[in-house]
Image: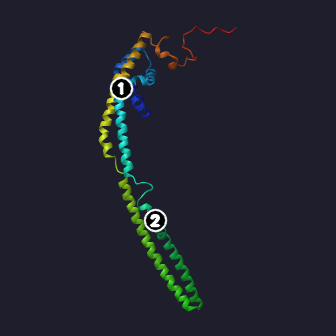
Amino acid sequence: MGRSSRLGDEDRSDYASALDEVIASPEIRRLLELSGAPVDRLRVRGLAAVARTTAAADAEYRRYTALRLRARGAQGGRRGAGAAPLSGPGDQERPGAGVLAVLGVLTPVLAAVAAATFLLLGYGLRLAGALSALADTLVGVGWFSLAVAAVTALVTVVALCRTAAKQSAADAVAVPGPSAAATADSPALAQARQVWLVALRDRGIRPFLLQELAEAAVSAPGAGESRGSRFSSPAFAGPDYSGPGFEGSAGPAPRQP
């Protein structure tokens, strides 16, 4: 049998919740009162023993993580197949598309500028009473340019509206809801997670806490925590702990002369 799987970071919150559920059970609460062990320190020891407790439900955890990876792979495949590429064959790569867009924007502007210029010159010559033939030509060309500007502006607005509508429809198709594979795997994934949590609580966390409380009761019979209690090690000592060694493991330091 191979090594047990290491608990992933994303599953540590589930482990902490399962630990709290076991600690809150009537059995553990009763033993806590009998042994006098602090609840918070028992929880710290349960969190520190994650490698030991999760090994008891390793088979269920492997199945759960395998189903989760498979579901994520199905979601990634569907998303990659449905999304339009940033570059590649398609309407965005046609050579004429960019030129037409530029012309659609510039033509109304240039035509409007030309219309204003011709009309100003034509009517200026008419007011001056000079070059009447040229003035009439400039006025005619100015009104024609103004008509071209109006028509091209209208066509550009319509084209922009159609492009925006097509883009919205394409985005709606490219970003579908949850994939069919992920939806089909969701019940199995939820069931595998629940099976793992049940096995973790019953075969991993609960026996560990029972052992810890039994040893605490033996080391501190009828008096709560004692100097030999496993809950009074340096890692879990209270405010009185001030040195690197176990409290009470040696006599008091000799007073300096």
- Does residue 220 show up? no
Residue 35: image quadrant is: top left
Q: Position of residue 54 (x, y in %)?
A: 39, 25
What is the quadrant of the N terminus in the image? Answer: top left
Colour option used:
rainbow
Q: Are marks 1 and 2 in contact (CB under 8 Å)?
A: no
* Horizontal relation, residue 248 to residue 201: left or right: right
- Residue type at tag 2: Pro
- Residue type at tag 1: Ala
Instruction: Check disc 2: other Cα within 10 Å, few if <14, some if 14-19, many if 20+.
Output: few
Q: Circle 1 — which element?
A: helix
Residue 255: image quadrant is: top right
* Residue 95, numbered circle: 2
* Horizontal relation, residue 163 to residue 190: left or right: right
Please name whichever residue, 86 or 23, is drawn nearer the observer in this view of the structure: 86
- Does residue 27 show up? yes
Is residue 235 shown above or below 120?
above
Q: Residue at x 55, y 86 (%)?
A: 123
What is the quadrant of the C terminus in the image? Answer: top right
* Residue 57, numbered circle: 1
Q: Position of residue 17 (x, y in %)?
A: 39, 29
Q: Position of residue 117 (x, y in %)?
A: 56, 80
Q: Residue at x 38, y 58 (%)?
A: 168
Q: Along the polypeptide, which appears first: circle 1 or circle 2? A: 1
